Structure formats: C-alpha cells, structure tokens
Amino acid sequence: MTSTRACSVQRLGLVEYEDALATQQSLVQACRKDGAARLLLLEHPPTYTLGARGDTGNLLADEARLQQIGAAVRRTDRGGDVTYHGPGQLVGYPILDLHQWHEGPRWYVRSLEQMLIETLAEFGIAGRREQGRPGVWAGDSKIAAIGVRISRGVTSHGFALNVDPDLTYFSHIVPCGLSDVTVTSMARELGDAPEMGRVIDSITAAFGRLFDVEMRQPQEEGVLVG
C-alpha cells in the first residue's frame, strides 16, 4: 500500500552544529504551519553536546583540553545527557508532527530504535534495545544514541549512528551519563567501514517503512532547505 504522507529527506554532508540547530528550529515552526515532514541527514565537526538536564560533570576534560583536540562544547534543548558528534557518525534530525500519527513520545523513540535496528541488520549487525536506556546496542556496547525534543507534538533533534567515527573522542565523556557504557561503531563491528551513502540509503528506506511515508529528495543536495 502506498503511503499518502510524504517526507522530504535532505542529505546535507558536514554541517556545523549551530547551523543545523537553527535550521531545525526554523523547520519546526514551518511544520506547525504546514504539517510537512522532513528528515535531515548529516555529519557534524567534532562537537560535544549536553541535553537540557545534562551534567557537566560527565565531561571528563575541561574546555581548554577539548579545544586542543578540535572539539566544541554546546548546550542544547534535547533530552538526554552528554554525547559526542563527529565525522563518520550519521546524525538524523526528523521534523514530524506526531499528531498526524496519533502517537506519542514513547512510540516515536521506539520507532527510531527499530529503524536503526533494521538498518544495522542489513549490514549483518545484530542491534538491540536495552531496557530503560534509549538508543541501540551491539553486543555490550552502544552503537547509536537517541536524544529528542518534542514540543507541542513536533519533533526535533533525533539519532546518531556510529558508522566510522574516531571513537577516542568518547573517552572524554561519560556517554549519555552512563558510567558503565562502552561505545562501538559499524566499522568496529564489521572490521571495515561501510560506505556512508549505503547507510544513508538504508536509513532512508527504513524511516519510510516505519513511519509510513514516501521519502522524497529535493533536487539540490548538500544545502539547507527550509
């Protein structure tokens, strides 16, 4: 059955965190007016972000040290604690009006987790949920993080899948505020890095299936489209 809803997917490449945040905020306002669904897929330069209630104590290095390794620190309004974004990590920011699905936050987060699990399965990686800990795990390590904001039913922020990032950056934080967490990537699990474009294709298809939307791509890629 063909979906009656459509979602614009934008593959943006490497985008500064502040630019992506400003774009999300603009698209949230647009979504409230027109109901249009959008999915931004991108990578960030090295950036540590703290959620709305994030504990700065979970940053294990001071800002001067993080600047030495080329990383920025940003406070943001998503849920969750501290996480790392960087090249080789696929970040997804869905902008959806959940009223159209007649569903709430729990369903939404579970759907994002399932999308990631199905994507990983296409590459031969057994992803799983862990009770009480949002995100997706491979073995005993976390391979994808989820941190969202839902305001008056409209979503922003989203997920981060470790395709082939430099995992040493995670040594400077307590990931997601969980002291017993180790972090892995698709490259580590597979022994070789998958091509980012293939991962994006898989994520896009899984998103369309799980949210029952037709995925449409703008004519111009790599530009921020409102």
Image (spheres, helix red, strand yellow):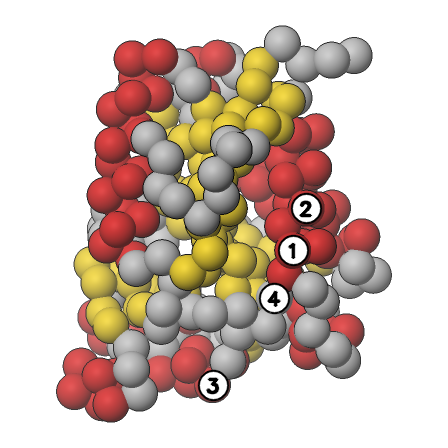
Distance, label 4 to label 2, CA atoms, is 13 Å
Q: Residue 214 at x, y = what percent?
A: 64, 22
Q: Are marks 2 and 1 in contact (CB under 8 Å)?
A: yes
Left or right, residue 50 beside residue 176: left
Residue in the picture at 23% in, 54% down: 18
Q: Of the residues tagged 3 and 1, which is closer to the observer?
A: 1
Question: Which residue bears the numbered disc 4?
Answer: 163
Residue in the picture at 53% in, 69% down: 88
How dense is the environment of label 1, judged by Cα within 10 Å: few (below 14), some, or many (20 and up)?
few
Give the secondary structure at mark 4.
loop
Give the secondary structure at mark 1.
helix
Distance, label 3 to label 2, CA atoms, is 27 Å
How dense is the environment of label 4, judged by Cα within 10 Å: few (below 14), some, or many (20 and up)?
many
Q: Residue 187 at x, y = what percent?
A: 68, 74
Q: Of the residues tagged 4 and 1, which is closer to the observer?
A: 1
The number of numbered badges drawn on the structure is 4
